[in-house]
Image: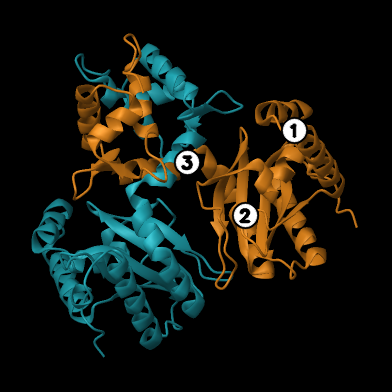
Chain colours: A orange, B cyan
Amino acid sequence: MANSPSGESMTSRIVRVISAFDETHQAMPIAVLARRAGLPLSTAHRIVNELMGHGFLQREADGSVRLGLRLWELANRSSAALGLKQIAMPFMEDIQAVVRQHTQLSVLRQDEVLFIERLSSHGSVLNHAKVAGRLPVHVSSSGMVMMAHSPRHVQEEYLAQQNPDASEEKRLRSSWAKMRLEGSARLPGAVVPDTTGIAVPVFGAGGTAVAAIGVVVPTGSEHISSTIPALMTAARGISRGLGVRAEAAGPHYQR
Amino acid sequence: MANSPSGESMTSRIVRVISAFDETHQAMPIAVLARRAGLPLSTAHRIVNELMGHGFLQREADGSVRLGLRLWELANRSSAALGLKQIAMPFMEDIQAVVRQHTQLSVLRQDEVLFIERLSSHGSVLNHAKVAGRLPVHVSSSGMVMMAHSPRHVQEEYLAQQNPDASEEKRLRSSWAKMRLEGSARLPGAVVPDTTGIAVPVFGAGGTAVAAIGVVVPTGSEHISSTIPALMTAARGISRGLGVRAEAAGPHYQR
């Protein structure tokens, strides 16, 4: 990565320092951080020292740095994820009580699914969706059901970006059409073999999906006829919590 | 609040903007944000616009701004809270399965308890400890048990800062001595009437508490004889996960 172009604002340098951390780079020496942020080492040192003073970064025993507890506290106390999460949590607990498998809440970010919250159940099956983790849309029932219930231009942008071959594009379009008709998505074994993801959209005021709620269950014991109505009931409750009128909170369950 | 003193770094201004948000100020107009951050309106506008461009802030429908989903994602994917949380989660699920009440993980920050994670159980009692929320040390069994197992100088700093009267100081010191002896804390009804908090320390490599794990249960059905050993077992498992040798992972349960 190149050094920061002259004239670049300090704000964007700080953003680049904070954004250099991810799941596989949770802590790193300042030299690595400088390289990942595209900053001269001296600039990185200065920003890191200041951010450490405010608890936004912190130093590990081995001298590497990581995002600080203070930043975590701020983000978890007042970010945009909180409203949705707080509204959804009681409904997720209801689902959890009925289905007794991983229950998760997610939103669409560009071409990926970002998982906002997850309740896991003792003895529930393996599930790769972590909180604040992402999965590609096409491998996730939550991603597919949100895309299916997104405005046409969002779907077209997704297809333009992914550039699937003709048969895959046809498959995606027909999956979305089916999911719109049924109001739910079911993806067998896309991530972990022998599991099935089942998800339904949470509708916002505009009548398009603003989130999805879903479960991951062992393939063969999906209990579709009870799981999907339970998810839809929860999704409608969440929509209502978001201020959406009942008649706009999505289609009824297609038997 | 005064305008930022000239010569103050851009980093600290940005930190002040992000730090201006809290549980009771999750979204606010830029003018309010500028005032809370102690910045001139024009400076606040510039920083807000840049941070919005990076998804660190986002605008609500009513024009107010709040912390963005991107910041939440970064903090939850790689902050210092994550290591502890990931190690603790399976043990918390074990506790949850046995006790079937709110189970929570916390750390000590200055004179307050910061809650890192919480599992709630359907039908469990009311509990004021929210994720990323704080409580004063003296009203929380988790706070008291961590303070009891903190180095002497931490306790003295706490007392100097709180400045309790002589009888309250005596009460705190004798509570800590008892909690050290028993290896656990039990606080009846400190926050919500008819509930009891029970917590044990999670020991770090230094032999002092680095976290606490606790439950909140209805007063009168605490099942102390089974709850405390379950919590201690979980705490030892978390210590081991943090790399602490078994013999340093804390005292055995005092019958």
**Element type where label 3 sits in the image:** helix
Whole-percent x, y for residue A204 in the image: 71, 38
Q: Which mark is residue A191?
A: 2
Residue that badge 3 annotates? B73
Residue that badge 1 annotates? A165
Q: Report if the CB atoms under discs 1 and 2 are less than 8 Å apart.
A: no
Nearer the camera: disc 1 or disc 3: 1
Nearer the camera: disc 3 or disc 2: 2
Residue placed at 75% from the left, 69% from the top?
A220
Q: For mark 2, name the chain.
A: A
Furthest residue toward top: A7
B6 sits left or right of B190 in the view = left
Q: Nearer the viewer, residue A210 or B177?
A: A210
Q: Amino acid at mark 3?
A: Glu
Q: For mark 1, name the chain.
A: A
Query: Same chain for the residues at labels 1 and 3, yes or no?
Result: no
Query: Same chain for the residues at labels 1 and 2, yes or no?
Result: yes
Query: Same chain for the residues at labels 3 and 2, yes or no?
Result: no
Q: Which mark is residue B249?
A: none
Nearer the camera: disc 1 or disc 2: 1
Answer above or below: position of A23 versus A229: above
Answer above or below: position of A25 versus B96: above
Q: For mark 3, name the chain.
A: B
Quarter occupied by residue B160? bottom left
**Element type where label 2 sits in the image:** loop
Report whether residue B179 is seen: yes
Q: Amino acid at mark 2?
A: Val
Residue placed at 77% from the left, 41% from the top?
A245
Whole-percent x, y for residue B99 in the image: 47, 78
Whole-percent x, y for residue B111 in the image: 23, 53
